[in-house]
Amino acid sequence: MTAGVQTIIYPVKDKDRAKAVFAALLGVEPYVDQPYYVGFKAEGQDVGLDPNGHAQGLTGPVPFWHVSDLRERLAALLQAGAEVVQDVRDVGNGRLIASVKDADGNMVGLLQDPVS
């Protein structure tokens, strides 16, 4: 099942400039600020800036659907005709992500938090 889109990741070329723009837009400072990722939380929405996103195949903002079983949802999407852009990977502390594109090239991200 899905808990909806709760995270949007933007691939960025200049992390510091993007961080300044999103801090001004969201009115909050990042809760994560690392060389590999900057994350904001605002009004229940996570917004991430990924300086490696372009190299990983991200061509624009990607909505990430929070799911209870990432591998099951990924298999269903592939069976429905989606193509893998980024296969399943652990981005830290058991959080799994993957991304696909549909027949029109639209990006769809999947995110599964570890079971507590």
Image (spheres, rainbow, N blue to C red):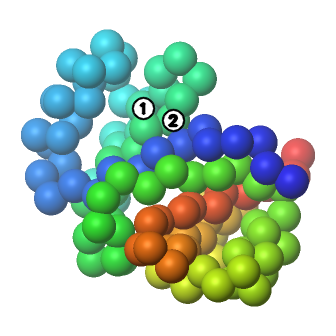
Residue 18 vertical placement versus 77 (above, below): above
> Which secondary structure, mark 1?
strand
Find residue 46 and report its horizontal and vertical position in percent.
Answer: 51, 35
> Which secondary structure, mark 2?
strand
Residue at 54% of width from left, 29% of height from top? 45
**Mark 1 neighbour density, 10 Å: few (under 14) some (14–19) many (20 or more):** many
Q: Which is nearer the eye, 63 or 22?
A: 63
Residue at 36% of width from left, 53% of height from top? 61
Residue 33 seen in this snapshot: yes
Rendered image: mark on residue 46: 2
Q: Earlier in the sequence, mark 2 or mark 1?
A: 1
Q: Which residue is mark 1?
A: 40
Q: Which is nearer the eye, 41 or 60?
A: 60
The reply to whether dot 2 and dot 1 touch (C-beta < 8 Å) is yes
Residue 61 vertical placement versus 55 (above, below): above
Find residue 93 and report its horizontal and vertical position in percent.
Answer: 67, 57
Query: Which amino acid type is marked by label 1?
Result: Phe
Judged left or right of residue 41, residue 10 is left
Which quarter of the image is occupied by the N terminus?
A: bottom right
**Mark 2 neighbour density, 10 Å: few (under 14) some (14–19) many (20 or more):** some
- Tell me the distance, in whole angstroms, between the alpha carbons under discs 2 and 1: 6 Å
| Extreme-front residue of the structure | 104
Residue at 42% of width from left, 74% of height from top? 105
Residue at 36% of width from left, 76% of height from top? 56
